[in-house]
Image (tube, grey):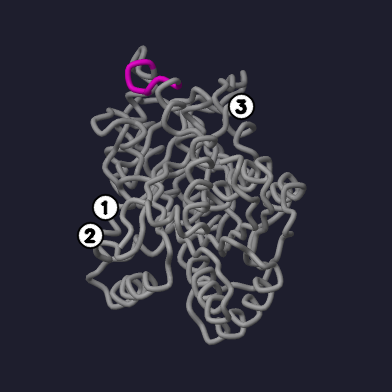
Amino acid sequence: MAQEKPLRILHCFRSPVGGIFRHVRDLVEEHSKAGHDIGILCDSSTGGEHEDRLFDDIRPYLSLGLTRVPIRRSVSPSDIATMWDTYKKIKSLRPDVLHGHGAKGGVLARLAGSALRVNRYRVARLYTAHGGSLHYSRSSLSGQFVLRMERLQEYFTDALVFICEYERDTYMRKVGKPRTKTKLIYNGIGDREFEPIHTRSDAVHFIYVGMLRDLKGPDLFVDAFAKTERLLGRPLSALMIGDGPDRDRYREMMVERGLGKRIGMLPAMRVHEAFAMAQNLVVPSRAEAMPYIVLEGLGAGKTIIASRVGGIPEVLGKDSPALVEPGNSDDLARVMAEALSTLGWHSRTMPPREAIKAVFSSTVMAQDVLKLYHELVNPTAGQAMSGAP
């Protein structure tokens, strides 16, 4: 790979929060260190002080700069103006690779890349769903529209990247067998994140870390916490760490149930700071692709209790006792109680960090993604790629 020419790579996504942002930051750092020119294009209206600090961390690696434009979550007439503005900005950066992440990022990257091709400018167009539109049901009208749009956009896509087997299988079930190139490349974390983070002396029993929205299950966490107290017959403590549109509603839920003094709330922070506050990390999501928080927690030596959704079973093991039925607070409370009351529960249920590191490494992830970029930019190499039509 060292013999290949440096690439100009632009990542497009909507919201600079959560797993997508983490994924892109890892690729930016690794590929910049490998000598490539990297840029980011994302929404200007989301994110806060925490995300600003994360941008500051990677700014030295963004030789193509950070471009922020207003990108709405839902489809609206304003998208037309956004697309035109985005196209002009992308064209000025002269990318070799446009990599869209999430539904809106995928649309922007592929349509802008296709417009560039009309003007005889060759650019590789890639898309990684990160769950996104794949969470929609084929039984709803909105789901049918979104999934059909995914199918249509395959004609403007040079490669689909799936971050776990679950995402690949879901795409095939809901959208159909891909008619373009595909590659399975697991999310990964860095070597420095496979160091244990010791729990503080004033730690709580459980933490939730993530976006405060129903899809991620904070309401299930609150409900299961109360049920765990009843199962164990004693008061417990917990923290919810993160930001999101439903924060006030969850606070009201806790106060109404008399849990306001036993469940604290803190704004989003760096995960190593959050992990020091408890040994037990609860991931009660209703839907996921391949959440970084699970990989980060395992790397830090934490005990994970998580919903059986997305790629989580591929990390914890398909038969792991730490997996609970999604949306079921009774089952979640049962496992939370077991984790506290059963001696040696962590060592018996958590996979060894060495095994996680062998598969879910950011170095391997970045190398595989870069190899795919080069195969697409170089047509000769691209013909040898598996799955080529």
SS assignment at label 3 = helix
Q: CA distance from mark 1 to mark 2?
A: 6 Å
Visible residue check, residue 379: yes
Q: Is the C-beta separation of discs 1 and 2 under 8 Å? A: yes
Image point 69% across, 47% down: which residue?
Answer: 54
Label 2 Cα neighbours within 10 Å, binned few <14 / some 14-19 / many ≥20 = few
Q: Amino acid at mark 1?
A: Asp
Magenta region: which residues?
A: 347-353
Q: Is residue 318 above or below residue 110?
A: above
In the rendered image, the quadrant that contains the N terminus is: top right
> Of the numbered discs in the image, which one, if any, rests on residue 192?
3
Q: Amino acid at mark 2?
A: Arg
Residue 133 in the image, given as x and y percentages of width and height: 38, 64
Residue 243 in the image, given as x and y percentages of width and height: 59, 52
Label 3 Cα neighbours within 10 Å, binned few <14 / some 14-19 / many ≥20 = few
SS assignment at label 2 = helix
